[in-house]
Image: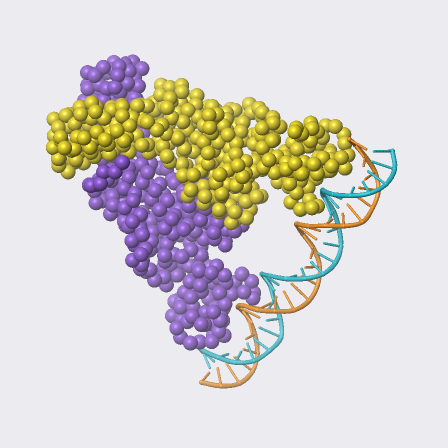
Chain colours: A purple, B yellow, C cyan, D orange
Amino acid sequence: MDLTPRKKEILKVVIENYISTAEPVGSKAIASQLTSKVSSATIRNELADLVEMGYLEQPHTSAGRIPSPKGYRLYVNELMEQRALSLQETEEINRALQMKMQELDGVISKAGQMAAALVNYPAYAMASGTPGLTVQRFDLLPVDQGSFIAVVMTQDSRVKSRLIRSETGVDADQLAALAALLNAQFTGVDETEMNHRLMDLSSKTPGPLFMTLSQTIEYACSVIEGGEKNKVYTTGANNILKLPEFRDADKAHELMSFMVDNTENLPVPPAGTNMEILIGPENVNEALRDTSVVVASYDIGDNMRGLIGVVGPTRMDYATVAARLSYFAEGLTKMFGKQDPLLPGPKEEQKT
Amino acid sequence: MDLTPRKKEILKVVIENYISTAEPVGSKAIASQLTSKVSSATIRNELADLVEMGYLEQPHTSAGRIPSPKGYRLYVNELMEQRALSLQETEEINRALQMKMQELDGVISKAGQMAAALVNYPAYAMASGTPGLTVQRFDLLPVDQGSFIAVVMTQDSRVKSRLIRSETGVDADQLAALAALLNAQFTGVDETEMNHRLMDLSSKTPGPLFMTLSQTIEYACSVIEGGEKNKVYTTGANNILKLPEFRDADKAHELMSFMVDNTENLPVPPAGTNMEILIGPENVNEALRDTSVVVASYDIGDNMRGLIGVVGPTRMDYATVAARLSYFAEGLTKMFGKQDPLLPGPKEEQKT
DNA sequence: CTTTAGCACTCCTCGCTCCCGAGTGCTAAA
DNA sequence: TTTAGCACTCGGGAGCGAGGAGTGCTAAAG
């Protein structure tokens, strides 16, 4: 049972008005914005239908109409025009992307910050890590009798290092042997396998050396298991205070607390696609059931993907948010794909 | 000109009542809480004096009194009792400290988060870096023809590394020479000096090699100039929404935006001491002039110190906040002093 | 059958007044 | 110096009414 074209147009007008004003839309206002010239009475009839069908709601008898989640859903699926970004917008985003060629460490949280700034809603960011990341190579650099530096380079060319102090003490020869052992047996395998092999070695290796070995492995595990991996960054929460639907401090507080505390079950990576919109009650999370979430993903190198999500009122400007976010995510993918993510690339100027 | 003991007691009662209720305190309520039994009329006379002297204020003629910044100041300096933390509180803090033995990278922001959680106010955290941090040693590990790993160990034993791609290509011998050069000439000197020496070498070094050299130096500079150093982390901003003085969304928004955007001129490291309280207009920042800030510092190793600050209404529970924050800061100092900050210490259990 | 004009009705919003009570300042007596 | 008494002030909340936006319905017109 499809809606008539006119009903669709009316629905669209209602939604777009409501998005920009946050106030119920009346029949007269609609009439003036419609392409075909019809009277407000006609519109009223149509509106009554739309309410009955569940696309619109009425706060009270004699107010205008506001969209229901079902209405928004239809809008997002069918009515919303692919909003083309203005040149200015794309440039702004590109510029922002330029600025952030930094180490991977900060990149995910930065992406979140940028997303928030881009759309003026709170945003969250995370990297959904690769399950099977492995170590590509180990280096152990002697520092002094008691300590050395462990350098771990992962499959995807990230490099991490740390000073490790061995209580038993190690000399350069032992370190070299250890490094050889590590590179021979502990590269290219995942975390559980590493621990496996470590166990196997426990009997064959002299105690003190084994201690040092396991310290190193432990560190390597922590690296590949990924500092960044499961962390969720939330930013821009202050943005919601500007919105009329969150003028109530309690409501604002509820959402904010949820976003910062409950980082784990923040919603919903996209399925196979790289962009998803969740409207109001479509969110599984209780606390988000009268907000909407737009989430986009981007690729980090070959086997990792990042997620940026934007949280806003159901009355969110889906067209703009979706357009900006997806452009941004594409930009990030390109940025990571173009070259090694850890390399700032050729930089001529030598400042400071 | 000192206040009479009774005036002080009255002031104290007013402040403590106001701190816990956020409502003007009347003469009658005061009378009932005073040790000596006097009538409310007497109190009223005293209150009038205190207002005239500037320790109290009257929102309007027929309301109770609220403390002025000057009043809070006196309270903090003289009247406030050193609040002893309950066993429960110290345990809670200790437990929190246990949990966070992680790499330095995250420690500062974590400290901020914990501080916020500890006092239920927004908090900020930063490491006021050592001005003259230097590189202690360089290592360059060849990866392949075009790239190598630069490992930089700073004076304070932090280790950072990154993959560097040299467009010109370098072989192992060149790398070794480069490393020797770096360790000979670029260790123990600060950033400007490093750039200085780099300049000097620019003519004496073959072009391609120089490119690589300067890439490495650039990275080293970025390390010692400190990823963490000047970053300010803000957390717990949502806490202010629970406070009656920030029920107004605009006010809350103003403060929040200030705290996240304007991270640079967040207020006021303590001078020589390791704890400072800034009340209302004592803050230089416009946006903070009707909030108070309690800031404490802790030592990170020998030549670096961390800062944690708490932002709240002037009606802040100074006694509790100060007590918890200073205990927490002491705990951090101890934690960092006990052993090398980068070392999680002997850990027997070998999990995952 | 659809569209339109007309009209009574609903219900929110805003401004107004009025009352209440908490708390004060002042005066005069103890 | 303290206290009791009392008139006064002022903010907050309840109650009321006008205004207005928007509706639903009906009946006539296309």
Residues B256 and A222: in front is B256
Q: Residue at x 69, y 27 (%)?
A: B5
Give the percent coordinates (x, y) of residue A321.
37, 54
Left/right of residue B67 with respect to residue A37 in the rendered view: right
Tell me where residue A5 sits by quadrant.
bottom left
Residue A23: image x %, image y %?
50, 61
**Which residue does the image show at 54% across and 41% down from the upper left?**
B290
Q: Is residue B324 visible?
A: yes
Q: How many numbered discs sit on the rendered protein?
A: 0
Q: Provide residue B50's location: percent of width, then percent of height.
A: 67, 36
Question: Relative to B297, is B131 on the left or the right?
Answer: left
**Which quadrant holds the N terminus of chain A?**
bottom left
Where residue B15 appears, x then y in whole percent? 63, 35
Q: Residue at x 16, y 27 (%)?
A: B178
Q: Is residue A166 above or below residue B115?
A: above
Give the image quarter of residue B107.
Answer: top left
User: Nearest the camera: B148 or A206?
Assistant: B148
Q: Residue at x 73, y 33 (%)?
A: B32
- Work out whether residue A233 or residue A55 is closer to the camera in this orientation and state it: A233
Please name whichever residue, B37 or A221, is drawn nearer the observer in this view of the structure.
B37
